[in-house]
Amino acid sequence: MTLLELRHEPLSLDEAVRAVQHEGAGAIAVFLGVVRNHNNGQPVVLLEYEAYAPMASKEMQLIAQQIEQQSPGVRVAALHRLGSLQVGDIAVICAASAPHRQEAFQACRALIDRIKEQVPIWKREHGPQGAYWVEWVDARCSADDHDHAAHAHRDPHEGNH
Amino acid sequence: MTLLELRHEPLSLDEAVRAVQHEGAGAIAVFLGVVRNHNNGQPVVLLEYEAYAPMASKEMQLIAQQIEQQSPGVRVAALHRLGSLQVGDIAVICAASAPHRQEAFQACRALIDRIKEQVPIWKREHGPQGAYWVEWVDARCSADDHDHAAHAHRDPHEGNH
Amino acid sequence: MLAPCCVRITVLYFAALRDLTGKAQEQLHLPDAVTQVGALAAYMEQVVPALQGRMASVRLARNERFAESSESIAEGDVIALLPPVSGG
Amino acid sequence: MLAPCCVRITVLYFAALRDLTGKAQEQLHLPDAVTQVGALAAYMEQVVPALQGRMASVRLARNERFAESSESIAEGDVIALLPPVSGG
């Protein structure tokens, strides 16, 4: 009974930890993705998250299964928030338990990495210059456009978390 | 105001997370060390933790300062429990926040690694064959003694978490 | 409109693509030549003005799974156009 | 007992060493030859029966900090004998 969910309600850290805790788990690694007050050098006031919900759920299941099969003894859980989030709100929680910390950290890191890479969730960032979809670079716009998308393109390593 | 404490009371995950959260932190990595039901192949029913408290506090401060100075933008917190713990109890919580997840994971991992290496805290494990101090190998005992200490010595990579 | 000659699919648009096309989904009747996912992407770039010049970074899902270009399309499939994801 | 000739220190025993020595701490008067941490460890292994053959894995702290062998010992120092730590 793996806990993997998309939710419009605030996420609970305790719930994620309880979902992976068991008597043989000596180590639990947890990752929290939190809305911060700037991105790509721009202030952020609001983030809107949306998902292709049924596919996102399937992808999260697939990722969790892969990680748990790769490392016997590992259990994972993930919660992702949808809707409007403000600075300080938790957007995502990943938790992984294992007998020892090495596997717990590895599994937790793999979980958040793969969720960010392949789960169909998108966020729109609202700042003083308006709103834009994070990671979307409009290929029709020329490289010297000074909109957010072009800005994001110039600094591709600066993800949200 | 870094949160670094030894406590006889149960540890609070939320407290550790709040201690590192701030508006510029997009990523928070947390590690929980939990008492599990076996170690070195032996059942565990109880662990007793003790510390050289004033020195342990200083060492935790030193470790936290080193990690925060090494990675600007990183904030860490650590809580370590003392006294009698049962299976499922949280023995240690490490938390690290950073703008992005790479630094948060690295700092959290460094924090728990160094705490386990150099903070003067000891645990005594109680199982069906009696109690023994974890990591203590009595050099006066011959190698073929079948006590817990010798057993631990044969499997030095099998730490508690 | 519902001629028996044509494969009918549902297309879903998300995030930036929903904004650009102005719709969340639509029904499409495919020409006989468009039988695989890769061909569908090229076809849509031609016939949907908002997609022109913008498909390079778009991934396609077929029935809620990422689809290879060579995957066949069947009557009733749900094809989603996914801009680069940005969850987390 | 408190002759002015001698440096007096407090020694703390923890965990397995407290169990083996049967005490948590004691006062020691050091011979004049014992002026450094390394020499102290060797001296204690000789004079404290419970420590004989057991000091190889023990680290020493001086006034709540890990101490180098070459560190000097002063009147009133608190020296802790630390078995391998096992926190976390």
Image: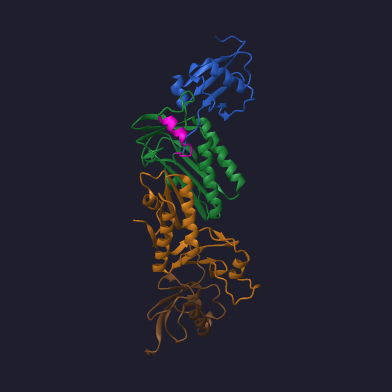
Chain colours: A orange, B green, C brown, D blue
Along the viewing direction, whichever of A86 and A132 lies nearer the viewer: A132
Which residue is at a point 63% across and 71% down the rendered structure image? A146
Along the viewing direction, whichever of D59 and A83 lies nearer the viewer: D59
**Residue furthest front as drawn:** B144
Along the viewing direction, whichever of B25 and A98 lies nearer the viewer: A98
| In the image, residue B150 lies in the stretch drawn in magenta | yes
Query: From what the image shows, is residue B35 above or below residue A141?
Result: above
- Residue range in magenta is B147-159
Query: From what the image shows, is residue B85 above or below residue A9?
Result: above
Along the viewing direction, whichever of A53 and D21 lies nearer the viewer: D21
Question: How many marks on residues?
Answer: 0
A47 left or right of B45?
right
Which residue is at a point 45% across and 82% down the rendered structure image? C35
Which residue is at a point 52% across and 52% down the rendered structure image? B22
D68 left or right of C63?
right
Q: Position of residue A151 (x, y in %)?
A: 61, 67
Give the quarter of the figure containing the N terminus of chain D.
top right
